[in-house]
Image: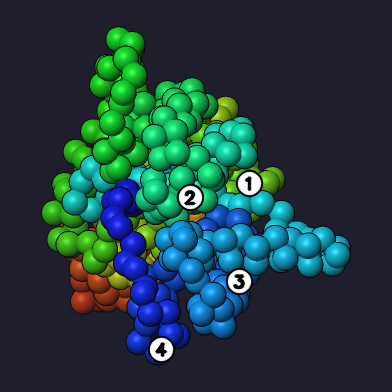
Amino acid sequence: MSGAHDKQHPAYPDMQASTERMEDIFQQYYGKIHKYFSFKVNPEAAEDLTQQVFIKVLRNIHSFNQESSMFTWIFKIAQNTLKNEYRRISRSPESSSDLSGYESHLISLDFTKHVEIQFDISSALKKLNALDNQIIMLRFFVDCTFGDIAEITGMRESAVKNRLYRTLEKLRVELKEWGDIAIMSIQNMISIVNKDKLGDSQKESPNKVHQDLFNKLQENVEQLNKKYKHVPSSKITIEIYPDLKTFHQAMGEHDAPNWFMGTMENNILKIVSPLNPGPEHTYDSILMSTVHLYAMWLIGDINPAAPKWIRQGIGGYESKQMSSEFIKSSIADVLKQGRVPYFHELNNDTWDFGTMKGFQLSYTIVQFIISKYGIDDLNKLIRNINGFHAIFNCSETELYEQWVEYLRKSL
């Protein structure tokens, strides 16, 4: 979400619907209207409704009388289009779930060259009244100017600004500990001028609980890039969800085990807030999980074909979340069962990966390779996952046997 800058909309004295003029209108306003629909409906419906709006704009451009800005005129068409869609859906029960509510909405804060952090504020937004919610949506998600919002809501521009400030304060309360830094990010992006007198607590910088997350990533990201000899191909985003239940719902995993508190999706790392880690994690373990996920993402960025055991193993090794006692106990349990899983068996993408001690076993594979062969050979394996003979002078089976022997000796 980017901040909006108040600019005057261009006037259209001759409103003949020429191709050139319609192209200008389309380029200037399509994105905003699409963002508006994206906030209200699913992605497919948002695209379809946006196209409907601009077909109506093309057909009715002659009726634009310049009593409002061009954007406000188009936005009202969009509002009416959405109302018609809601009516249509309400008459079609089998389709009603398509408009059951908006998805997670995130505000962003950049803090290193390669990482952006986002905060999920959807639950907080749902607690606002309709007008406050609309103002937040228009300003931050649709990138409207204060003048646009004033026209749309029928309020004075100064009243919009004051209402927005009060609404941000409501969000601060709803976001609790994350609120200060989230609101700081918004205010930095849009340069809201605070005309009210702040209390001492509101003047304070984000407290240590916020800074810990940033520091943990900041001190590890560049080190990992250097260690694994890679410059990230793109920036990643870290999404933070307020609690375990919200995180599981957002991931579509309502019945996920409590240890599931983070995952990756393309260039997005998704985690539970360290302030609400759930029963099987702690504040510190969530902090380190961001390092785990970043390391996994980095290895996948180096080689998308890198197997899960390499990505998970390096993530666990670099984050140091698991104690040596926990790992030894887990390995002892595996050895008692009589057979250690082969490398390919550790590419399991089901919940069985946790049950089969996949995190611990993958960790020890990486630990073994580094201790016996060194980080340079691990880097070679990341880039050439089938190059066992060339890298280690042995077959995959022989390396597996060496690792199993390493496990036995480590107990």
Which quadrant of the figure has residue 372?
bottom left
Residues at discs 4 and 1 in contact (Cβ within 8 Å): no
Q: Earlier in the sequence, mark 1 or mark 3?
A: 3
Q: Which mark is residue 151?
A: 2
Q: Secondary structure at mark 4?
A: loop
User: Residue 160 location, x and y as percent?
Assistant: 44, 37
The residue under the point 44% across, 65% down is: 66
Q: Which mark is residue 249?
A: 1
Nearer to us of marks 4 and 1 is: 4
How far apart are the two marked residues, 2 and 1, measured between alpha carbons? 37 Å
Q: Is residue 18 above or below residue 400?
A: below
Q: Residues within 10 Å of mark 4 (few under 14, many from 20)?
A: few
Mark 4 lies on residue: 18
The residue under the point 54% across, 36% down is: 132
Nearer to us of marks 3 and 4 is: 4
Q: How is the image coloured?
A: rainbow
User: Residue 24 location, x and y as percent?
Assistant: 35, 78
Q: Earlier in the sequence, mark 3 or mark 4?
A: 4
- Residue 146 appears in the figure: yes
- The residue nearer to you, when weighing 341 against 162, is 162
How far apart are the two marked residues, 3 and 4, measured between alpha carbons? 23 Å
